[in-house]
């Protein structure tokens, strides 16, 4: 007979995740220091290394944890309700925070801090990952530990569960919910959770996903998937047929070669119809058109200053050229204006 997980089990798991996160942060800091030393050795005197596209990013606001909010340790994904509220998931803290559209008036939207033994379904949230706000105003949260998309109203009251195996990313478009799973499958349901279709299996082949992170849908029903471990973005038609791929899985023979994408994480469709992809490992944002072509240098720069990104993950379009990001290792939510600098096609 299988034993139901208890609150003690979940707290132990959470402490283990925090310890692992601390180790990862330490390793990343050491790696960044090594890269800095190497760059200082290999750069010619008087020629500072630069990153293309930095001029296309303007920081508008920042939001941090602290005080009544508690820590905002490793924020994962963000969502905007189209009016005034930004939501951010914090998996290691087991909570979702909310801010106004200028990054102020922070509050805890939903968390679970009650003690006692309960079933998974009785917890409000445990490990919230992907998040989106539907046209119905409800907040959809992919909770990997609860094995469900948990739906709340704007007051933080539970509405329903949509059972999904290992949900990671979620977006709502029209009357459909798109859930990206860690098992390598995109699940499509109606707003009540009734299955409508699915695509993909786990792996590295053309019709497969590995470590897929996020999903976005444009106004024509085209579905965009960030296939993180396979270093690519995949576009699907509304009937789940592959339209194009940008990037490809890495191989041992690729060592030392430049890649189109290193680790695509968050993905969003802007008001201009272009696709904005967070390339987390290099802390930049790639901009693709609807055909999967890039027409501008990457936006952003890796670093710890206010106008730099530090291994960001989730991204959401807000209005005009304004986007909001979960700048994960900066432990912040940041609003930025993104202005792709269109490359000239003139030949000398």
Image: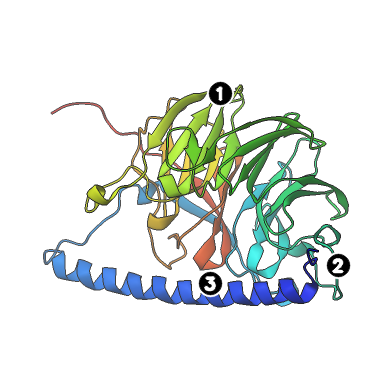
Disc 1: which residue? 237
For marks 2 and 3 on the same chain, the one whose residue lies earlier in the sequence = 3
Residue lying at 74% horizontally and 57% vertically, measured from the top left: 146
Instruction: Count neighbours of disc 2 (C-alpha within 10 A) and say few if under 14, some if 14 to 19, many if 20 or more.
Output: few
Q: Secondary structure at mark 3?
A: helix
118 with respect to 79 (left or right): right
Residue 192: image x %, image y %?
Answer: 82, 36
Q: Secondary structure at mark 1?
A: loop
The residue closer to the viewer here, 231 or 43, is 231
Q: Report the Cα–Cα distance between label 3 and label 1.
A: 37 Å
The residue closer to the viewer here, 303 or 112, is 112
Q: Secondary structure at mark 2?
A: loop
Q: Report the Cα–Cα distance between label 1 and label 2.
A: 41 Å
340 with respect to 102 (left or right): left
Residue 265: image x %, image y %?
Answer: 50, 49
Residue lying at 68% horizontally and 69% vertically, measured from the top left: 93
- Please report contact status of discs 3 and 1: CB closer than 8 Å, yes or no: no
């Amino acid at each position: 007979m299988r034993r139901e997980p208890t609150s003690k089990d979940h707290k132990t798991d959470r402490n283990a995740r925090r310890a692992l996160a601390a180790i990862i942060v330490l390793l990343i800091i050491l790696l960044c220091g090594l890269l800095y030393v190497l760059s200082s050795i290999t750069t010619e005197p008087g020629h500072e290394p630069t990153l293309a596209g930095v001029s296309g990013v303007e920081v508008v606001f920042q939001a941090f944890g602290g005080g009544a909010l508690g820590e905002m340790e490793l924020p994962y994904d963000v969502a905007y309700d189209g009016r005034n509220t930004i939501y951010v998931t914090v998996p290691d803290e087991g909570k979702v925070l909310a801010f106004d559209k200028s990054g102020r008036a922070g509050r805890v939207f939903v968390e679970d801090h009650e003690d006692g033994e309960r079933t998974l379904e009785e917890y409000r949230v445990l490990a919230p990952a992907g998040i989106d706000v539907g046209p119905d105003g409800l907040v959809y949260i992919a909770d990997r530990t609860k094995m469900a998309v948990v739906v709340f109203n704007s007051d933080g009251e539970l509405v329903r569960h949509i059972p999904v195996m290992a949900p990671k990313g979620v977006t709502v478009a029209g009357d459909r919910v798109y859930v990206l799973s860690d098992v390598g499958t995109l699940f499509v349901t109606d707003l009540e959770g009734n299955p409508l279709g699915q695509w993909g299996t786990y792996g590295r082949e053309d019709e497969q996903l590995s470590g897929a992170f996020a999903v976005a849908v444009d106004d024509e029903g085209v579905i965009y998937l960030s296939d993180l471990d396979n270093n690519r973005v995949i576009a699907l038609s509304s009937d789940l047929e592959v339209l194009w791929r940008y990037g490809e899985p890495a191989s041992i023979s690729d060592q030392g070669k430049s890649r189109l994408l290193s680790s695509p994480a968050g993905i969003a469709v802007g008001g201009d119809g272009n696709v904005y992809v967070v390339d987390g490992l290099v802390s930049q944002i790639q901009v693709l058109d609807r055909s999967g072509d890039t027409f501008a240098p990457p936006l952003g720069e890796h670093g710890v200053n206010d106008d730099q990104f530090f291994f960001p993950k989730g991204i959401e379009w807000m209005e005009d050229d304004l986007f909001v990001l979960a700048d994960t290792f900066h432990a912040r939510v940041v609003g930025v204006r993104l202005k792709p600098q269109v490359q000239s096609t003139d030949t000398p």
